[in-house]
Image (cartoon, coloured by chain):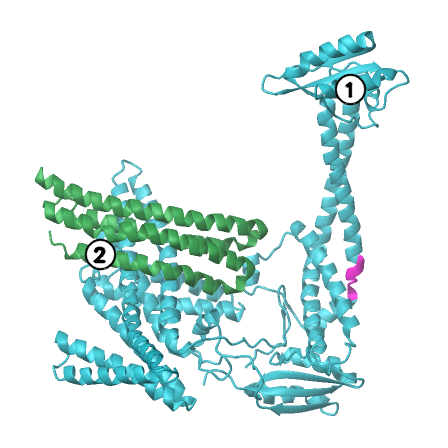
Amino acid sequence: MEQYLGIMLSVLGAALAAGWAGAGSAIGVGIAGESGAGVMTEDPGKFGLVLLLQALPGTQGIYGLMTAFLVLLKVGLLGGSPLAVGIWQGLGICFACLPVAIAEYFSAIAQGKTSAACIQMIAKRPEETGKAVILPAMVETYAVLALLTSIILLNSIKL
Amino acid sequence: MAVAELKKLDLYVHKSVCDDVLGVLQKVGCCEIISRTDDASREAPVMNERLQQIDGQISDIRFLLRFLEPHYKDPVSSLDRSLGERPIFSMEELEKLSAGTNVGDIAARMHSLESRLMAVRSEVSQNIGQLDLLKKFLDFPYPMEFLSCGTERVRGISGTLPVASLQGWKNAVESRLGKDTEIFVARVDEKDPDVWVTLLYAKEREPEAFEISSKYSLSRVEIPRNMTQNASDEIAVLKKRQDALAAEDAFIVRKVGEEAEKMVPAIRSLSDYYSSLRKRFEALDDSIVTEQTIALQAWVPVKAVDFLKRELLPFRDSIEMVLADPGEGDLPPTLLQNAKAALPYETLTKLYGVPLYGELDPTPLLAPFFFIYFGMCLGDAGYALVMIAGLLYFLRKYKRMPSSVKQFMHLILGAAVSTLIYGALTGSWFGDLVDSVGFLSFLKPIKNLFFVIDPMQKPMTILGIALTFGVVHLGFGLFIAFYDCLRKKDYMAAFCDKGAWITMLSGLLFLLGGAAGALPSVFSPIGKWMAIIGAVTVFLYQGRGKTGIMSKFFSGVLAVYGSTSYLGDVLSYSRLLALGLASAAVGVIINMLGKLSSGIPYVGWFVAILVVLVGHTFGLAVNVLGAFVHSLRLQYVEFFSKFYSGGGKFFSPLTYSSQYVDVTETSANS
């Protein structure tokens, strides 16, 4: 029983990371896409720029996926036999996933809103694309920091 | 200094050579005309009718391109064209072309073709509507005449009626109008809530028929008066007409296609020609025009002055040039001048906004950092190889691409080289492709040759490196600010503001380093005193402008508290580690998915190759975007905030416009 609980807690962590981050990205990309569709009804030629800005909140989902994979790799669920993971270790891995699960979800939504606003901006001022890309990237900082925290925490748990 | 020095040129030109001189100015392409439209001394624009004439031509050309281009099969793709694959013309050739082409006539001809096409198409859609209507009357045994205009004795109405009120309507008609009517009801469709009905009645009973019908909410459909025969006959006539119209449509489209084939290239060239002329006369419009002379004002880079003088030599008897330094109230534009190695990075400066005239150009300062950061963020040698190959292909294929595109490609090429180096050092070649795919294991010695550190295993080491870069970068930014203040002879700000910050922050660093044992312990007390002196200076300097002891105190404290922002700034550089890890990890994940899918029986190898190819393409795109944006952000937000504010206007000289063709004899502004 005990050895399964450790592994399953790790799986819970991986699932939370990938699930919440993916959900956040989906919402964020969706918000940006709605705005982009509005702009493209006026000027379909802006597709490239709009797509670029719409893609920005998508990275959180990737970070979540990445964290999940790192966890699965760590406990040996991917290729090879599962390692023995104690309850406390499993709980630690689960907690280590929380920064990604929480910060990626909310930051993706916030970034989606910023992207949507920036899409509106390039509708009027296409020459300011450089600045329009930077503003959503400001939000992403915190997604990157959360990812970093999760990676470091995962790394520090010895199995 | 990397912002080019400009001279203000006052050019007085006699009217007789005005056009030629403007032509030369446009040809050399190194003069930005200063607009004097708000100048009080300006007289009524004399040349405006020429501008109007050109505007007329341009609007004709716009119409022609809008109308003809959809029918034109372009032998050069728009990507090729935007990368510089454009026909080359000299201004004389374009002049000849414009003399031999009467744009107005062509536009008139195309207008008539267009209106014919519109007429045909609107008739076609009208006929489709009539055909739909007539189909409802196929069961109607009488000529349509009864319904459209009525005969001497009989009239009829037709329309839709809600199924629910059908029976009521029928009863009402029979009881009120009796024998003088005849009712036709089309087959009731179960899904349709309405039914199509037709009612014939004696002419004199019309008011009653209308009254009953409107009571049962029959919505009447007007039958066009030209329909007189039986429905099937009318349909036959209309179908014949439709065929004729379709043939005419095809004929016109073919004709337009032929015209487009013949004329679009010429029209496009003329579009550029007239836009160029327009710019030229706009310059005139921006200048002061008197009876005999034109007074132009322009900004000219100092380096181009001799060249310009040489070009204007033939007109020396009819012009007068006065060169002066920018004065007090002037707002000169900014022209960046950089060595070849830093040139690609100008793109980044322009993206943020160029410096004001006379300010520092940050281009060479940010270049090395951007180069390194991009490499660390992307950090995969395999991706770098793909990028380098792609970029080299484009750079070799398109020799004549516009300089801005070329600069950008060189920028990314440099970044890819940096990525190659960092990826090789960290042993990341398409993630862990070399290790995970059996038959690639012969590449392992090459990989191991360059391999130094694996960020996955030792993230803290890379984090330390990233944060060190942050400290260096921020410190460099502060030093630039310090130097900039010295350059402007603002010694107070240099020493009490920037210098104090540098003292305080490096003191804190020494203190930290000493405490952590990274530096000899003698640094600790030195650091302590440096930090204290710096903090006190910042405290005093920031408070000096305020009145009242309390506000002095608080603004000073607030300023010292601002040092925490440096902590945030430094930590922000941890993204170099995180993004590098992310691209490496995504690569590993893709390889693993490929490996897993190779276990599928029979088609496994194919699926695996597909997964790896598609996955790495996706990974490359996402990570390049991320690496670009984040290494740029470190420049804009962390680095620039220390010393740079942009706000300049980019130098935009009078040149030819070249949307479709390249006009030669334009010397690049030097």
In this rendering, position of residue B445 left or right of residue B329 = left
Residue topped by disc 2: A151
Question: Is B482 colored magenta in this rendering?
Answer: no
Mark 2: few/some/many CA within 10 Å (<14, 14-19, 20+): many
Q: Which chain is green?
A: A
Q: Please, which chain is the residue tagged with disc 1 on?
A: B
Residue topped by disc 1: B211
Q: Please, which chain is the residue tagged with disc 2 on?
A: A
Quarter of the image containing the C terminus of chain B?
Answer: bottom right
Residues tagged by mark 2 and mark 1 found on one chain of the structure = no
What's the CA distance linking mark 2 and mark 1?
82 Å
Q: Which chain is cyan?
A: B
- Mark 2 residue element: helix
Magenta region, residue range: B100-105
Question: Is B104 colored magenta in this rendering?
Answer: yes
The front one of B120 and A68 is A68
- Identified by mark 1, the residue type is Glu
